[in-house]
Amino acid sequence: MKKVVIIDDESAARNLIKDYLKDFKELILVGEANNGVDAIKVINEFKPDLIFLDVQMPGLTGLEVLGHLEEIPEIIFSTAYDQYAMEAFNMHAVDYLLKPYTKDRFSKAIEKLRSSDSAEGLQMLAETLIMEQPSYPERILVQSSRKLVTISVKDIIRIEADGDYSKLVTKDQTYLSNYGISKLEEKLNPKIFLRIHRSSMINIHFINSVDKHISSYDVKMENGDVVRVSRGYMDNIKNLMY
C-alpha cells in the first residue's frame, strides 16, 4: 500500500486524479492541497509515499515545495505547462503528466511507478535539490536508510570523506551524502565549515579545544571526536587564533 497526496490548485484536476485512483487499490489518498504553502504542511504531516504535484500554484511552485519537505516521496508531476518537463525529469520524477491527459496515460504513469528504482531516484533528487540552492543552504536533504530527510546545516558537527561519498556527523546520527567532501566544501558556508584535512571538515561552532603538537594540531569537537589537522591545512586553524 502507498499513501498518496494530491497537490493542485484546480479542484477539477484533483477530482480527476481521485477518480483515476479508484482503479489502483494499493494507492490510498490521505490528503490534498490547493497551494504550495499548504502542500508543505500536508506532505510533512502525512509523509506520503507518492505525490501528484502541479507546478504553477499560488504561494510556492511545485518545484519550490520540494525544497521545503522533511522527506521526499516519489513524484508524478501533473501540469498544463510542458516547459518544466526537462527540469522534472532531471529531478528523476516518476512521470510528467501533461494536462489534459487520459485515463490510459494516467495508468501508464502508475506502471512506471511500480517499476521505478525509487531509492536511486530519490537520492538523485536530493542531490539535485542541494545543487540548486541559490546560496549557502540552511537545510539540506540527506539519505537516512531508504528515506530522504532534511537536516539543519548548523547541526552538522563535522564531515568525513568516505571514498567518493561523505559522512555528515551530527549529535544524534551520521548521514551519508553522495557528494565528495570537495563538492560539499563548495556548497557550504566557508565561514562556518573549515577544511582541516583532505578527508575532514569541521563546523567551527562545535570546536571544544585544540591540542598543539610539534608539526600538527588535534581539534577536539564538543561531541568528543578528535580530528587531526594535516600540515597543508594548518593555516586554516591558525587563522582562527587571536
Image (cartoon, grey):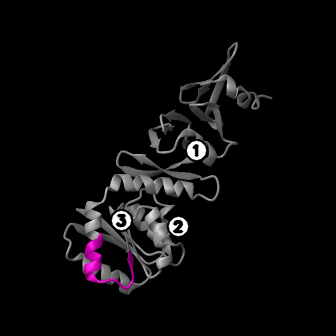
Residue 209, compared with residue 93, is above or below; it is: above
The part of the chain drawn in magenta is: 97-109
Residue 22, position as x, y percentages in the image: 21, 77
Horizontal arrangement in the rendering, residue 137 relative to residue 129 (left or right): right
Check disc 3 and report its element: helix, strand or loop. loop
Q: Amino acid at mark 2?
A: Glu
Query: Is residue 159 located in the magenta-colored stretch of the structure?
Result: no
Check disc 2 and report its element: helix, strand or loop. helix
Residue 221, position as x, y percentages in the image: 59, 29
Camera-side residue: 42 or 74?
74
Q: Could you tell me which residue is drawn at 51 percent across and 44 percent down?
A: 179
Residue 134, compared with residue 35, is above or below; it is: above
Q: Of label 3 and label 1, which has the lower sequence position?
A: 3
Q: Amino acid at mark 3?
A: Val
Horizontal arrangement in the rendering, residue 147 relative to residue 37 (left or right): left
Instruction: Point out the frontmost of discs 3 and 2.
Output: 3
Instruction: Point out the frontmost of discs 2 and 1.
Output: 1
Q: Of label 2 and label 1, which has the lower sequence position?
A: 2
**Residue identifier under label 3:** 94
Q: Amino acid at mark 1?
A: Lys
Horizontal arrangement in the rendering, residue 50 relative to residue 161 (left or right): left
Q: Could you tell me which residue is drawn at 80 percent across and 29 percent down?
A: 242
Point out the image quarter for the N terminus: bottom left
**Residue identifier under label 1:** 183
Residue that protrudes farthest toward the right in the picture? 242
Q: Could you tell me which residue is drawn at 47 percent across and 34 percent down?
A: 163
Q: Of label 3 and label 2, which has the lower sequence position?
A: 2
| Residues marked 2 and 1 touching at CB (< 8 Å) | no
Residue 64 disc label = 2
